[in-house]
Image (tube, rainbow, N blue to C red):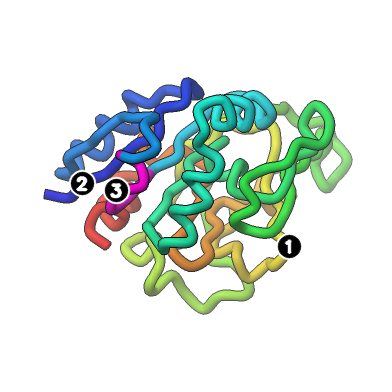
């Protein structure tokens, strides 16, 4: 049985992530203990809410250095929703806030208008298909290896990640015609803007892949 640690820092519905991983056969530990996290074989950083509050929560628990050390040790790390955004260098939400700096890039507000100039609802909420990024030929070797372009996942977000190196974006979605980074990856780090644990069987395929790698 795969062992997965979920970082519990008080941001988001952690129990739904736990249930999703358990459905994939994982033995799940919820913890904010640095030693337990660093001893883990696979780690999930979930999150819902504001970027600054997320970083403050991690800092207050002494977990910023811990998560950076996970990256140094090449321990598989999956960021979900806010957890994905925290992986980047900074966010402009409520002023500039520094992130974990594990994947170069920044988090910006989603456009309030479509490419056609019509107002669109923010946050972006709902099921949206993902596609292969233009710089990649496929998803082999990534957590999307068992997924297919066009499969839809559940998104809830008002801000979006913009990696500095666009090759880090392995899957896109579109909202109002605007391209959104749906999945980013670098080395053993992956971030999903959507919620795989709320995305039915398509989401479980990603979580299974994370557990099995």
Q: Which residue is label 2 attached to?
A: 3
Q: Give the percent coordinates (x, y) of residue 75.
A: 37, 58
Observer-side mark, 2 or 3, equals 3
Tag 1 secondary structure: loop
> Which circle's residue, 2 or 3, is located before the other in the chain?
2
Seen at 69% across and 28% down, the residue is: 52
Whether tag 2 and tag 3 are in contact, CB under 8 A, the answer is yes
Seen at 66% across and 31% down, the residue is: 51
Whether residue 38 is in magenta: the answer is yes
> Which circle's residue, 1 or 2, is located before the other in the chain?
2
Q: Which residue is label 1 attached to?
A: 164
Identify the residue at the far right of this view.
Answer: 117
> Which circle's residue, 3 or 1, is located before the other in the chain?
3
Horizontal arrangement in the rendering, residue 77 relative to residue 22 (left or right)? right
Tag 2 secondary structure: strand
Q: Give the percent coordinates (x, y) of residue 46.
A: 45, 35
181 and 202: which is toward the camera? 181
Residue 163 falls in image quadrant = bottom right
Which mark is on residue 40?
Answer: 3
Residue 171 falls in image quadrant = bottom right
What is the CA distance from the residue labelled 2 to the residue labelled 3?
Answer: 8 Å
What is the CA distance from the residue labelled 3 to the residue labelled 1?
Answer: 29 Å
Q: Residues within 10 Å of mark 2 (few under 14, many from 20)?
A: some
* Magenta range: 36-43
């Amino acid at each position: 049985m795969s062992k997965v640690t979920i970082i519990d820092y008080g941001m988001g519905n952690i129990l739904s992530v736990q249930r999703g991983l358990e459905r994939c056969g994982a033995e799940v530990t919820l913890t904010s203990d640095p030693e337990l996290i660093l001893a883990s074989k696979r780690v999930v950083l979930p999150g819902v809410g504001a970027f600054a509050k997320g970083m403050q929560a991690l800092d207050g628990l002494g977990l910023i250095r811990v998560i950076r050390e996970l990256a140094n040790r090449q321990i598989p790390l999956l960021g979900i929703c806010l957890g994905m955004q925290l992986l980047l260098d900074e966010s402009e939400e409520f002023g500039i806030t520094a992130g974990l700096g594990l994947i170069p890039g920044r988090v910006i507000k989603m456009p309030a208008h479509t490419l056609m100039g019509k107002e669109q609802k923010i946050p972006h909420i709902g099921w949206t298909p993902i596609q292969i990024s233009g710089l990649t030929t496929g998803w082999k070797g990534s957590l999307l290896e068992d997924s297919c372009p066009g499969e839809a996942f559940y998104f809830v977000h008002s801000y979006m990640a913009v990696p500095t190196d666009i090759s880090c974006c392995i899957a896109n979605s579109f909202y109002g015609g605007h391209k959104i980074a749906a999945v980013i990856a670098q080395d053993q780090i992956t971030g999903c803007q959507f919620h795989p644990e709320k995305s039915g069987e398509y989401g479980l395929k990603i979580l299974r892949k994370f557990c099995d790698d």
